[in-house]
């Protein structure tokens, strides 16, 4: 087995495995005294123990540091021993002596709780549940004797996992047919942390992820990039594991890795390990006895146990060592410098610069040295005469190191109610639940709960005030320190109805139309998901589609549509077109055709005055948009029903994020994204009305525009000169993208909005797609037919490491099928292993002319590209239905 670091970790892992393998001791339901005098003594002892417990709890609340001391452990053991010494515990089998409760005392669990310094909290957190159970049992008793000599006491010291609130167990989860994983959603009672447990006995990779509902939207204005910087600092040591690279070293030793990302409103942390990595690490043979138990899911692997223990310390007591901060600030700055030449980041920054400056979306999320130190200069204090010109570490470079802000950020946001955890392991669900409870029960539940930084925070605030008073640090107004800004709308009327031209770094020509939409979590978007129908139609590639027409004209290389940005209060629906040089010259015409196709979709809706029957009631023709919606729903259901388990690391990270959306219905977390109610025509109509030029931000990315950067003129009819927006080129603040923008001319806007209204006709070549005829309806398996069962098999015998013979039956080899065509050989293999209705076909064409000469090779590759392009429209429906080729 892997030799864990430090040495004590190996001992802890072994003890943990022993706890899990050890069968629970007999549950004893009553406490009966031998004599009346002893009964009285027991009652008095119990009252004394409870009194002392309450006093210890009150004292511990005022002195939380003592809960981590040996005093609390010894006191807990002494209390338990005193109580047990006066009582003889035995099972109540005499039915003539009714019990007042069915309390359970598991001394092994109690000792384990005391050893982990959670005895007192566990006792009192479950006390309420014990009283309710007593009352229910009293009501269910048919007779009670007033002279009974039995005194039954409902214990409050149940194992910690019994107190866990199970929200949904495996049997209720909606899963794909091939999914062999087991799921359970729980909430830890101590801190309200919701957890999704996933037991996968077949996995070769174990993983975990925590998603935190805090991102760069929560940055104070004076510390742009704080959430990103905070993410970096969490990896640099904790109180329990203070070495800087200890976490990464442990993961690497166990065949794993870790990563994290900071988003607008979220931050995600995840890791992976190999549960049986000891096979490759030269572990001694004595540790191999644990391997079979890990394989069978009886115990948690040492790799997952050690990794999750280290991971959990991020959320208990990180160090945030100030001596490492200047170096990490420079690392953030390097990330920023490297992204300056990325067109993706430049366009993203331009979009942020376009919104209302008082909305959180406008914030600079990456951060750099200057913004994170509130005015510091990372080049301040360079050594003179140094060959390498090495920078001297000057704290904050004239600004201030943001340790105070980092600690406050962690204290406020990194709490149980603001996080979701997903764990994927080989072990059974019960074992994973015990592990999570052990590692995460002492994470703080609320920002008002005591934190390990409370004393240090006061000292840091005092030091900061001294710097401000001395004038060596920049101050900040209350508004600048606010995380959530005041604007209610990121993109209002003054930010839309705009057309912008951008000069890219790379050779790329794109046209992007962005429309302001409600957030996807909004009921009108989430229930029937009408935006998917719009995305489906606008991005369709069948004959007569917008893509097909533009491609035939030689204007585009590709076209896509859908919601590309989604936050809590708005989303953006985009239509993105990759242009050819010819298409760039015809961009006005392309925008015309886009709005024509939008008008064509609008015409397929029933009129607002139509009756329910005309909108698609029973025994009436169903409107075409509803049929497209049903197609999307059927395809999504088929893809879900027969989807296979993906990579555990990506799965854990994605599910942790998704758990926020499905926290009240975790059983739908797997299927939720494809669930769609019947199409709501009224909501669809409202979304189509939002696809209006006045609600659009149009961006044209053109490398040839650089030639006109010194020319302050514009001949496009789409631009309108105003006092607010002139035609001069501007430069975005953070990434330096050069752009110019104008309001869309009102006459042009009216033209785009008038297609299909009788004033302007729609191009007759445009039409909505036919219904998809490739969607499968029969999912029966041919391998289940008697005529198709494989009767032949190959049996091999192999010898494993312990000299045990293992006979394995291999699948039947492919059959050579009869065929009439000369030079053609056909083989078929009936699959009986995976049992999903999928067929894989491989056609191998052999020709001596392909590699005959360089010219023939080039012509063959050109033919392949032309064929793929020509087949795009023809096979698009088949691809949507799950038939792929390459």
Image (cartoon, rainbow, N blue to C red):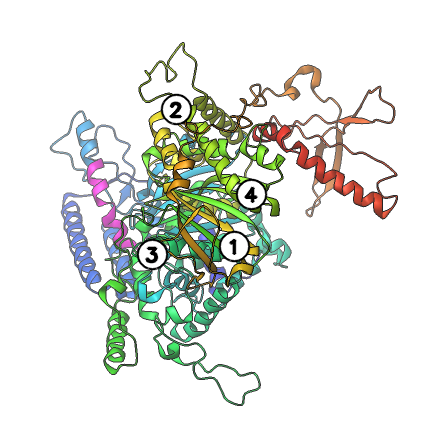
Element carrying mark 1? helix
Pointer 1: what residue? 303
Residue 725 in which image quadrant: bottom left
Residue occupying image coordinates x 84% and y 26%: 824
Mark 2 crowd level (few <14, some 14–19, many ≥20, 10 Å Cα): few
* Mark 1–mark 2 CB contact (< 8 Å): no
**Between 469 and 69, the one nearer to me in the picture:** 469
The Cα atoms of the two marked residues, 1 and 2, are separated by 47 Å
Comparing labels 1 and 3, the label whose residue is closer to the camera: 3
The Cα atoms of the two marked residues, 4 and 2, are separated by 39 Å
Q: Earlier in the sequence, mark 4 or mark 3?
A: 4
**Between 284 and 416, the one nearer to me in the picture:** 416
Q: Is residue 64 visible?
A: yes
* Residue 518 placement, left or right of 243: left
Residue occupying image coordinates x 56% and y 57%: 254
Pointer 2: what residue? 678
Q: Which residues are magenta?
A: 112-133
The Cα atoms of the two marked residues, 1 and 4, are separated by 59 Å
């Amino acid at each position: 087995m892997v030799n864990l670091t430090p040495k004590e970790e190996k001992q802890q892992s072994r003890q943990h495995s022993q706890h899990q393998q050890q069968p629970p001791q007999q549950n004893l339901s009553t406490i009966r005294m031998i004599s009346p005098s002893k009964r009285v003594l027991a009652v008095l002892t119990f009252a004394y123990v409870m009194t002392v417990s309450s006093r210890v709890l009150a004292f511990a609340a005022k002195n939380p540091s003592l809960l981590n001391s040996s005093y609390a452990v010894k006191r807990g053991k002494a209390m338990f021993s005193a109580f047990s010494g006066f009582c003889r515990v035995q099972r109540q089998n005499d039915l003539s002596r009714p019990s007042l409760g069915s309390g359970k005392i598991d001394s092994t669990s109690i000792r384990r709780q005391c050893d982990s310094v959670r005895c007192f909290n566990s006792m009192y957190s479950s006390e309420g549940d014990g009283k309710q159970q007593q009352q229910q049992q009293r009501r269910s008793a048919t007779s009670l004797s007033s002279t009974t000599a039995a005194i039954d006491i409902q214990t409050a010291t149940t194992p910690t996992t019994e107190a866990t609130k199970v929200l949904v167990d495996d049997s209720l989860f909606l899963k794909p047919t091939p999914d062999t994983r087991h799921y359970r959603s729980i909430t830890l009672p101590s801190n309200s942390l919701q957890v999704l447990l996933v037991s996968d006995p077949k996995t070769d990779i174990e993983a975990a992820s925590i998603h935190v509902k805090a991102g760069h939207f929560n940055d104070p204005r004076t510390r742009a990039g704080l959430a990103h910087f905070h993410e970096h600092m969490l990896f640099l040591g904790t109180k329990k594991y203070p070495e800087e690279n200890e976490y990464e070293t442990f993961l690497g030793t166990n065949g794993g890795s870790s990563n994290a990302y900071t988003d607008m409103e979220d931050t995600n942390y995840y890791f992976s390990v190999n549960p049986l990595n000891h096979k490759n690490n030269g572990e001694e043979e004595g540790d191999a006895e644990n391997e079979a138990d890990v394989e069978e899911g009886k115990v948690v692997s040492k790799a997952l146990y050690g990794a999750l223990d280290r991971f959990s310390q991020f959320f208990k007591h990180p160090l945030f060592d100030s001596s490492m901060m200047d170096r990490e600030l420079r690392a953030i700055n390097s990330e920023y410098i490297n992204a300056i030449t990325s067109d993706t980041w430049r366009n993203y920054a331009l979009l942020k610069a376009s919104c209302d400056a008082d909305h959180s979306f406008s914030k600079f999320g990456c951060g750099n040295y200057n913004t994170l130190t509130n005015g510091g200069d990372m080049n301040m204090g360079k050594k003179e005469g140094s060959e390498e010109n090495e920078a001297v570490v000057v704290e904050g470079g004239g600004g201030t190191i943001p340790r105070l802000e980092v600690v406050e950020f962690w204290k406020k946001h990194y709490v149980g109610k603001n996080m979701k955890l997903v764990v994927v392991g080989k072990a059974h669900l019960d074992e994973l639940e015990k592990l999570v409870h052990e590692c995460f029960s002492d994470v703080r539940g609320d920002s008002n709960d005591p934190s390990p930084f409370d004393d240090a925070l006061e000292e840091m605030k005092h030091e900061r005030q001294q710097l401000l008073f001395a004038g060596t640090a920049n101050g900040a107004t209350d508004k600048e320190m606010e995380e959530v800004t005041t604007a209610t709308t990121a993109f209002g009327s003054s930010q839309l109805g705009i057309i912008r031209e951008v000069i890219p770094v790379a050779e790329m020509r794109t046209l992007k139309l962005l429309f302001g939409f409600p957030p996807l979590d909004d009921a009108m978007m989430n229930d029937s998901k009408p935006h998917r129908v719009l995305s489906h139609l606008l991005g369709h590639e069948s004959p007569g589609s917008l893509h097909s027409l533009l491609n035939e004209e030689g204007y585009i290389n590709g076209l896509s549509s859908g919601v590309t940005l989604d936050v809590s209060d708005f989303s953006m629906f985009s239509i993105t077109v990759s242009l050819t040089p010819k298409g760039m010259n015809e961009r006005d015409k392309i925008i015309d055709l886009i709005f024509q196709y939008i008008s064509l979709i609008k015409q397929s809706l029933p009129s607002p005055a139509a009756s329910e029957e005309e909108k698609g009631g029973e025994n009436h023709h169903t409107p075409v948009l509803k049929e497209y919606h049903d197609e999307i729903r059927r395809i999504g259901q088929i893809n879900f029903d027969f989807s296979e388990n993906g990579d555990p690391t990506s799965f854990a990270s994605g599910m942790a994020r998704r758990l926020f959306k499905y926290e009240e219905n975790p059983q739908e977390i797997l299927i939720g994204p494809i669930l769609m109610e019947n199409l709501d025509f009224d909501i669809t109509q409202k979304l189509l009305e939002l696809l209006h030029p006045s609600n659009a931000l149009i961006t044209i990315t053109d490398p040839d525009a650089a030639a006109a950067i010194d020319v302050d003129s514009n001949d496009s009819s789409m631009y309108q000169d105003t006092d607010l927006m002139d035609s001069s080129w501007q430069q975005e603040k953070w990434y330096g993208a050069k752009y110019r923008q104008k309001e869309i001319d009102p006459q042009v806007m009216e033209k785009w909005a008038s297609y299909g209204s009788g004033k302007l006709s729609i191009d007759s070549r445009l039409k909505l797609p036919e219904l998809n005829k490739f969607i499968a309806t029969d999912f029966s398996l041919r391998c289940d037919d008697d005529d198709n069962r494989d009767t032949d098999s190959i049996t091999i015998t192999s010898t494993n490491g312990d000299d045990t013979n293992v006979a394995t039956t291999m699948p039947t080899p492919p059959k050579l099928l009869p065929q009439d065509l000369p030079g053609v050989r056909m083989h078929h293999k009936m699959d009986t292993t995976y049992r999903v209705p999928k067929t894989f076909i491989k056609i191998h064409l052999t020709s001596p002319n392909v590699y005959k000469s360089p010219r023939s090779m080039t012509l063959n590759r050109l033919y392949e590209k032309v064929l793929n392009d020509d087949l795009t429209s023809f096979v698009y429906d088949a691809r949507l239905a799950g038939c792929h080729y390459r």
